Amino acid sequence: MISLLNSPLARLGLAILSCIVFVHVWILPSSQLHQKPPQFQLVISHYNENLFKVKEWITAVREMPFVKELGSTVTVYTKNKHANLDQIKELLDAADVIRLPNVGREQGTYMHHINKTYDHIYPYTMFSQAAITGLNDTGNASRPFKDWLDKSLRYKFTNETKFFNLQHGGNPIFCVCGSCPTGYFPLLPQLQTLFDNKVCDSTDKQSISWLGQFIVAKEKVIARPRWIYEYIGSLVDAPEGHWIHQEQEPADLKQALGESLPDNPLFGHTVERIWPTLFNCSKEPEMQGCMGSWSPMPGQKKKDGKLGELSV
């Protein structure tokens, strides 16, 4: 046996084995310790959307150059009591899939997530409904998916971004103390007063968000005390019979959606519009600072410090 071990072939084998052990015991753990943790979290509000469509846009977002540089992770909240959590996790390559009661729409989901992660929220968080414009379950795209992705992420999401509304490419939609292009939202000015400690100025306009898809930096989230998110979350998730369901919303919303109920509260449409104000990004010059600098798409020129204005 000793003579066999002393043979050149045996010594070569032992040398190779020693190298393999060294790599696995010392080098690999050391490199894993130095891996940079993800800096970008994608938070998705799911109900019954087509998971293959959801996977398509999640994969595209995670492949965006800056998102890829940051490293990303996915958390899915579903309010579908019949959803298979393991299936969602595997198909969407999600770190976590969490079932929530079916109340509050996606705005309640976002408030829940912020409250839950307030002390350790990621440097950047993208909040989104599972279905996005240009890539929905019906395939009836009102805007090409690539166009949405390019305008919203590839060229405009940078390390200077503090808050970015994805649905209108960063171009703001404005309200004045609750008077919006889509109607009057009576609780908007009350929430603005809650945030800013002053009565809403009717001579000043405020940028709003729309359709519940945005990116926000950690510093903007924790600039507001946790109790504000807890309070708004309690209202948007309120049970049947709560006074919030009696609050008057724009007539066209009530006509289209019917009465306010816990699983579809009309107040959720107010919360949907309040995010820029909540993150102190609804007025100039703060609004421009929240957008940061961005690169124009090929064939376009960047406007000098000005954002366009949209109406809906």
Image: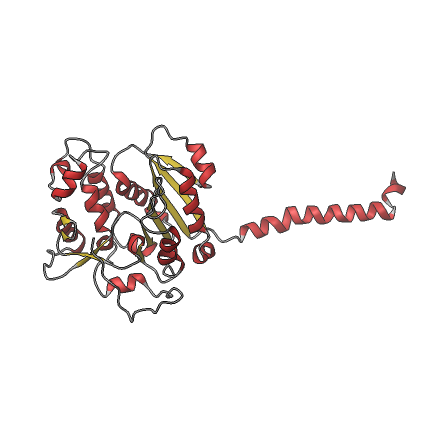
Q: Position of residue 77 (x, y in %)?
A: 35, 38
Q: How many marks?
A: 0
47 to 269, vertically: above or below: above
Q: Position of residue 66 (x, y in %)?
A: 43, 58
In the image, farthest residue toward the front = 140
Name the side, left or right, on which 23 lies relative to 69: right
Residue 249 appears in the picture as rendered:
no
Q: Kindly indicate the quadrant of the structure image that contains residue 116.
A: top left
Q: Nearer the viewer, residue 290 or 34?
A: 290
Q: Residue at x 27, y 59 (%)?
A: 171
In the image, farthest residue toward the bottom = 304
Q: Residue at x 37, y 36 (%)?
A: 98
Q: Position of residue 121 (x, y in %)?
A: 36, 49
Q: Residue at x 59, y 48 (%)?
A: 29
Colour mode?
secondary structure
Residue 251 appears in the picture as rendered:
yes
Q: Position of residue 176 (x, y in %)?
A: 13, 56
Q: Nearer the viewer, residue 290 or 25?
A: 290
Name the side, left or right, on which 239 lies relative to 186: right
